[in-house]
Image: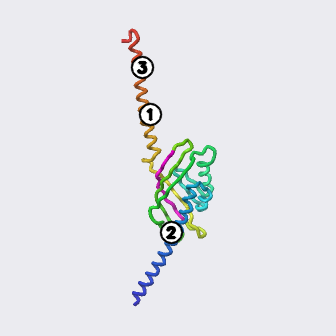
Amino acid sequence: MKKYLLLILLSAATLARAEENKATHDELRALRDRLLPALNKGDLETMVSQLATNCVVTWQNGEVSRGRDGFRSYYNRMMTAPGHIVESFSTSVKVDELTILYGDNTGIAFGSSDDHFKLKGGLDVPLKDRWTATLVKENGRWLIAAIHTSANVFDNPLLAGAKRLTVIAAVVTGIAGLLVGWLIGGRGKGKPGSQ
């Protein structure tokens, strides 16, 4: 009888924990559902409100922003300030699996994103990223404490464009060299006593 009672108590505790985790994952989904539309609309203050006060953000270009003011500063410099380089940005995000929970107030989420940057000069840059986020629960709300985004440095649109430009430059240089050689060679043959 004690064995069955223990089994019933363990089952009840497991079900209670699963229900608690479901509620936590629902709260984390709500954070995602607030953040993504804000990113795609350029709603800076809604983005900032999803960040922990002392957050750390590592951007695709390797720059690091610390705190909400650091996030605002980077975003404004890249998107709105005089001389900004990004005209518009949009993203779609995929989460690889449920957030890994560490206790009741910390979690790690990770996944991928398909980003699209339109740069000030008119260049469209699609970029596939990987990201990892540390989430914390502060004052009853889940917030992003840290996020790191990175792109494949060996295979991305910017690298592919640079490779194309290198090939084009090599072809143009080769043709120019042949043309200059032909012109110099042709002129040399026409001069008296040049043979």
- Type of amino acid under label 1: Ala
Q: Residues within 10 Å of mark 3 (few under 14, many from 20)?
A: few
**In the depicted view, which residue is nearer to us: 12 or 2?**
12
Residue 96 lies left or right of residue 34; in this view the side is: left
What SS does tag 2 mark? helix
Residue at the spot of label 1: 169
Are discs 1 and 3 less than 8 Å apart at CB? no
On the rendered image, what quadrant is the N terminus found in?
A: bottom left
Q: Amino acid at mark 3?
A: Leu
- In the orientation shown, which residue stands out farthest toward the bottom? 1
* Sooner in the amino-acid sequence: mark 1 or mark 3: 1
Residue at image coords 58%, 62%: 50
SS label for mark 3 = helix
Task: Report the coloring of the rendering.
Answer: rainbow
Q: Which residues are magenta?
A: 124-135
Secondary structure beneath disc 1?
A: helix
Residue 132 located within the stretch drawn in magenta: yes
